């Protein structure tokens, strides 16, 4: 089991950040995530494996001016 933005989600061996984002609703673009306290940027989403019991926070791109 993993936690994504304080919501529980089923985990399986070989799970990647991209896979988690694809399963989530209302996630149009996410620039980075915090995986167990470590920042991971979008170019690494397909190759970054998620360990069991991971805590993930989505960090969407925010534009302003």
Image (cartoon, rainbow, N blue to C red):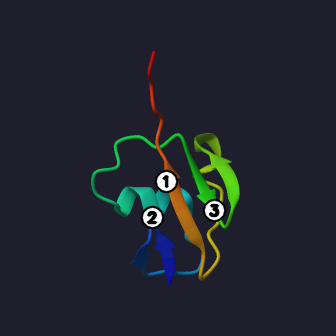
Compared with 32, 6 (above or below) is below
Describe the element under mark 3 as helix, strand or loop. Answer: strand
- On screen, residue 41 versus residue 10, left or right, reads right
Describe the element under mark 1 as helix, strand or loop. Answer: strand
- On screen, residue 54 versus residue 38, left or right, reads left
Residue at 49% from the left image edge and 74% from the top image edge: 3
Residue at the front extreme, as displayed: 65
Compared with 65, 2 (above or below) is below
- On screen, residue 30 versus residue 45, left or right, reads left
The quadrant of the image that shows the C terminus is top left
- Quadrant of residue 41 in the image? top right
Q: CA distance from mark 2 to mark 1?
A: 7 Å
Q: CA distance from mark 3 to mark 2?
A: 11 Å
Residue at 28% from the left image edge and 57% from the top image edge: 25
Q: Position of residue 14 (x, y in %)?
A: 60, 73
- Quadrant of residue 48 in the image? bottom right
Which residue is label 1 attached to? 58
- Are discs 2 and 1 less than 8 Å apart at CB? yes
Which residue is label 2 attached to? 5
Which residue is label 3 attached to? 35
Disc 3 crowd rating (10 Å Cα; few below 14, some 14-19, many 20+) is many
**Marked residue nearer the N-terminal end (2 or 1):** 2
Disc 1 crowd rating (10 Å Cα; few below 14, some 14-19, many 20+) is some
Residue at the left extreme, as displayed: 26
- The dot on residue 49 is none
Q: Position of residue 34 (x, y in %)?
A: 61, 56
Q: Position of residue 38 (x, y in %)?
A: 71, 58
**Marked residue nearer the N-terminal end (3 or 2):** 2
């Amino acid at each position: 089991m993993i936690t994504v933005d304080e919501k529980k989600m089923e985990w399986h061996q070989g799970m990647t950040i991209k896979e988690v984002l694809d399963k989530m609703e209302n996630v149009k673009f996410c620039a980075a995530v915090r995986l167990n306290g470590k920042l991971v940027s979008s170019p690494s989403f397909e190759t970054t494996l998620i360990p069991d019991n991971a805590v993930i926070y989505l960090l969407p791109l925010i534009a302003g001016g």
